Image (spheres, grey):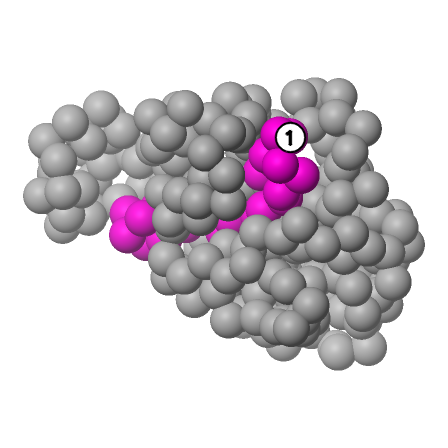
Amino acid sequence: MIFSKKLKKFHGIKHCFFSRKGGYSTGIYRGLNCGRGSKDFKKNVSKNLNYVSKKINVKKENLILMHQTHSNKVIEIKRKNYSVMVQSDAMISKLRGVALGVLTADCVPILVYDKQNGIIGCIHAGWKGAFSGIIEKTIKKIKKQNSFHKIYASIGPCIGKRNYEVDLKFFRKFLSLSSKNKIYFIKKNNHKKLFNLRKFVADKLLKLKVKIDHVNYDTFDEKNNFFSFRRSCIRKEKDYGRCVSVIKIV
């Protein structure tokens, strides 16, 4: 279990960036695979989610996950739309007794807390979601609740810049959005760049006046600690596991 030093200081919330350690899955999913969308045995995923629920101290039916599609859709979880699986890539809530979870395997999990108004949130920020505004939309949705706010965010384990190789088409796509995005890339060779997804995400939060910290692990490098979509592709594995990051109001 991995924690943000900043978020851990707040007594109003409980959180955790879970690694793949522990759990009941085997083979390529060995450990704590929480991906319901994976091809892992459903009973193993269910047992893993039960393990997470107990660690975060909520009922399993109160651990809310998302069906993530790399969109910029944000949902506020209320009693009337309460479900253990919602269609979005970010959630916010004021509800007590529920935990919000985000699944990742190289993308960035972001846990958010508005201390002023008792609002929690989680964001699934892959390059597509971050590019299309998932971070801005989530923070804006929190700020709409009250003009006074104190928002903190922790940026969790994700793929590191030295392992995120992209082609020139990808690079040009970011430059078409803004020439300033050039700072997030370094040259690998004449045909490839390396992309700093963590910094791209962090700068968006800082621009929104959110106070941040980093739980800085490279999911690609640390195969014993984290699942990685890209590493699984390189190994030509049939599928990959997903780690979960969770936050709740105490």
Per the rendered image, the range of residues in magenta is 112-133
Is any part of residue 217 visible from this angle? no
Q: Name above or below for residue 112 compared with residue 23.
A: above
Give the vertical position of 3 relative to 25 (above or below).
above
Work out whether residue 83 or residue 239 is closer to the camera in this orientation and state it: 83
Q: Is residue 144 magenta?
A: no
Hey, which quadrant is residue 35 in on the image?
bottom right
Residue at 39% across, 35% down: 201
Image position of 111 (left or right of 206): right
Residue 120 within the magenta-colored segment of the rendering: yes
Whole-percent x and y of residue 193?
Answer: 23, 36
Name the element at disc 1. Answer: loop
Disc 1 marks which residue? 115
Residue 65 coordinates in the image, percent (x, y): 64, 63
Lateral position of residue 158 relative to residue 197, left or right = right
Q: Is residue 14 visible?
A: yes
Considering only vertical position in the picture, is 101 above or below 144?
below
Task: Check disc 1 and give the amino acid type.
Answer: Lys
Residue drawn at 45 percent across, 58 percent down: 74
- Left or right of 39: which side holds 202? left
